[in-house]
Amino acid sequence: MTPRKRNSTLFIVACAAAVFAPSVVCFAQAQSGYACPSGRTGCYQSGYAGLTDLEEHGRDTWYFWTGGDRDATGKQVVGDQALWRILAVQSHGTFDLLQAADSRYRGQRFKLFGVISDPDCRKATHPDRYGLWLDDCSSPDVPRIPDIPGEPAGIIGMRKFPNPNFKESDWDVNKYMADPAKVEPPYLIGIACGFCHVGFNPLHPPADPENPKWHNLHPGIGNQYFKEQLFNTSKYPPERGLKTGDFRWQVANAQPPGTSETSQVATDHINNPNVINNIANLNFRPKHRERTEDGVERDVYHVLKDGADSIGSACLDDPTPRPGVNDTACAALRVYVNIGLCAAIWTTLQDPVFGLKRVQGVFDPKLARQQNSACNQGWLATQARMEGLEAFLRTLTPLRLADADGGATYLPKNSESVVRGKLVFAENCARCHSSKRPPQSYQGEAVDWYRIAVMQDDFLNDNFLSDDERHPVSEIGTNIERAMASNATEGHIWQEFSSGTYKKLPEVHIDGLVNPLHTSLHLLPVEATGGRGYYRTPTLANMWATAPFLHNNSVGLFSNDPSVAGRLAAFQDAMNELLWPERRPGLKTIRRTTQASTFTYQEGGTVCISRNTPIDMIANVDLVTPEIFRKDNFITRFLCHVIGSGHLNGLFLLADNAPDFVQDRGHTYGSALSDEDKHLLIEYLKTF
């Protein structure tokens, strides 16, 4: 760390001591005494004060690390940029992040795609030497981290790398744009964690979301405005992108903003985009005793929405449990694998784009590392950064509305109302949404303990605001699609990254699901086995700034407005629907095709889908398609005609992996309260 970083002094807007680190971490609105290379008063490095060397290492990992660069030979691509190239080739450019990063969209990226432009880059005024339009990131303020390869690509969390397979003599930009599989590009694109998890700072939102400054960004709030599939499949000009008559456009357009389909690659044939995690108070996150895949009992975290990433330190070279150290390393490594680490191995264990040619195989990281030096190098390099990454994430504390620009005006003024709101929370919410719990020696009713606890001035301090337990979806009543994810179950691709305890969870019986073809009827019950059928309790930290609600962002208004007023409008609307379920759209949330559409196999065969078809009825079908049905022939043309009529939709419904179509149902806790108590509870929740 340079002396310049250590000598910086900042105007502090949010500051908290980290329990497992001696430093005090502060996010800056403005700064004094720090000289950015360009002479500006604010840049990436100036946004923090008090980070230890380890925490700073983790911060840089969060924003910039994509898993590596090249192996020792200089030929094999090590990091996740290999995955995005594989997907561009196998999808023939439908999914191509190099084209999605086109600089001509800068100035409307947030409006169109919800992505955040890098404050240190500028819109390109002309194509580069290869005819590609990429942001100008030549500013001296661009962070250059010696041990992290790559360059910024103009969008937060996106990195650009030289392609070792590029030959300038073979390059043809028009041929590339027509089909990236036909020519190697000069650059590869990689993705860091910050691509999804860095969002606009609720305390200091940007005046112009298209042109934020570094102090307008926050590393842990999550990008609640990200339109994932619309961005991933975007082209310039827009006419080159997917058409509305393409079923893939229908799926992409129906995905709620602020969600990510983390089981798209590797696909589990369930359309289950879920909200991007909001990270705060990890020092106080509850752990759970589970038996991991190596047969050892460990205290682990439940990481994903369904609690499937429950591996502790079992996947490390030295898997000895160490309380407080590397507690999330394996789950974090699984995320890096899922976004590309060791892609040259695990993409061969499935059909990574559509999953239609073969079933999944199990990815064994130990075996993969033995067989592939690039995989091993990328794994070891990423593993070495996990301790710092965890240390940095542990510095992230809740963002209080009272500290937001103008936020105090929205807080409750009547102390008696606040007291009543606290009691309503204690009696109706704290059982699941508090990590502060009655001690084991406590002999009374839990609700009585909570009534006293919430009145303490420090109740919200050091509180994860969740028990982080897995609860059966049959009890919660919410949409089951994410809970039915199968990638971490026995025999599936991420089997090695979930615990034996997870895989042996009790079976969950789910009934009352609506038939989307005849909404007055119910479907047959569903049995969730092998670990499926559960959701872990989300934290309520920052909830005033993170609406819409539920795991799929289905409850409440999406305002696309990151201002304090915009966030609170979304919060109020979401709470109105959460506590008054009768106000929810209900059946209207069933995702349906807006027109007749088709899905065309790479080999030429076509599946026809009628207008108003429930999208998830098609997207949730797990089918390895025989080659004859993937080709254009008399049989496939006849089937396309018949299926396109919609009369055979019931057959798809029978094969649906997660036949739950109403997105905003369930979690009706608190609906029986009086209107007054509901309003007082809402006022108290604003302080979280």
Image (spheres, grey):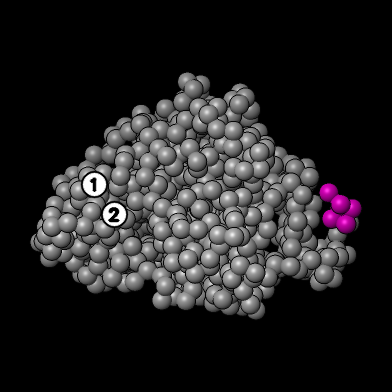
How far from the left and from the top, in percent, is residue 145?
Answer: 75, 52
Q: Main secondary structure of the magenta part?
A: helix
Q: 539 or 41, which is in the foreground?
A: 41
Could you say which disc has been placed on residue 639 in the image? none
In the figure, residue 349 lies in which quadrant? top left
Residue tagged 1: 627
Answer with mark 1 or mark 2, whichever residue precedes in sequence.
2
How far from the left and from the top, in percent, is residue 473?
Answer: 32, 45
Type of amino acid at the residue the image marks with label 1: Glu
Q: 287 or 252, which is in the foreground?
A: 252
How far from the left and from the top, in percent, is residue 517?
Answer: 15, 61
Q: 519 or 544, which is in the foreground?
A: 519
- Specify whether residue 592 is in view: no
Q: Residue at x 42, y 39 (%)?
A: 348
Q: Circles 1 and 2: CB distance less than 8 Å?
A: yes
Q: Residue at x 40, y 56 (%)?
A: 91
- Specify whether residue 612 is in view: yes
Label 1 – label 2 distance at C-alpha: 8 Å
Query: Range of the magenta residues?
Result: 1-6
Is residue 636 highlighted in magenta?
no
Q: Residue at x 58, y 69 (%)?
A: 132
The local secondary structure at tag 1 comes to helix
The local secondary structure at tag 2 comes to loop
Residue tagged 2: 603
How far from the left and from the top, in percent, is residue 480?
Answer: 31, 49
In the figure, residue 49 lies in which quadrant? bottom right
Q: Report the side of 418 relative to 382 (left or right).
A: left
Q: Quadrant of the C terminus?
A: bottom right
